[in-house]
Amino acid sequence: MLMLPNNPNIVMAAQQAAELADGAVTVVASRNVPQGVAALLAFNPDLDGDGNTSAMTKALADITSGEITTATRSTTLNGVVVEQGQTIGLLEGKLIAAAPTAHDALLALLDYAAPDDGSLVTLYHGANASAADAAAAANAIEKRFSGVDVDVQSGEQPHYHYLVSIE
């Protein structure tokens, strides 16, 4: 059995649970949903457990993950001044941007990430971002980053306007 925690706060508990399990459980230490999706896509039913663990773990390193959410308090972190209620962008868990809208925060996050020509950016739009909002964001990304492909998926996540993967 493979376990994908998809949260950095859960990885250690998942590893402890795997040690206590009656059967064989392997933890692929995904820290967020985009990493978990990348790991799942790397799964190959023709490989054995070790082969899949290796391929899925490698997939975690091949993806850059971002999150667009709403600040719950005012703070200054990493040189970014944030007011409660602003939209913020986190890249690999690091605060990168604060902006008045999810669209602005998303573009600021991607400006910072600087996806290469030929990169695939996947946007998982949450419950607070409509399909039309996500389509407009994808269009803006494709215009700003020539040679980048954008895939839009409905994630319906309640606390994030967007989850972003860059590969």
Image: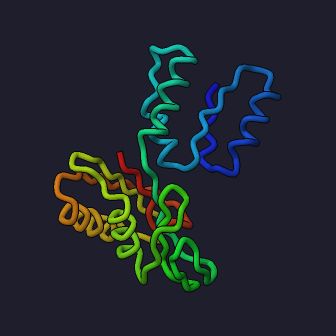
Which residue shows up at 52% across the image and 42% down it? 36
Tell me if 118 is positioned left or right of 7 in this view.
Answer: left
Q: Is residue 43 above or below residue 112?
A: above
102 or 108, which lies in front? Answer: 108
Which residue shows up at 45% across the image and 35% down it? 59
Q: Is residue 165 above or below residue 140?
A: above
Image quarter where the C terminus lies is top left
Q: Is residue 14 above or below residue 157?
A: above
Task: Identify the coloring.
Answer: rainbow
Which residue shows up at 37% across the image and 64% down it? 112
Which residue shows up at 62% across the image and 78% down it? 72
102 or 12, which lies in front? Answer: 12
Q: Is residue 80 above or below residue 117?
A: below
x and y percentages locating residue 87 in the rendered image? 48, 77
Check the image and name the residue furthest to the front.
79
x and y percentages locating residue 137 in the rendered image? 29, 67
Number of residue marks = 0
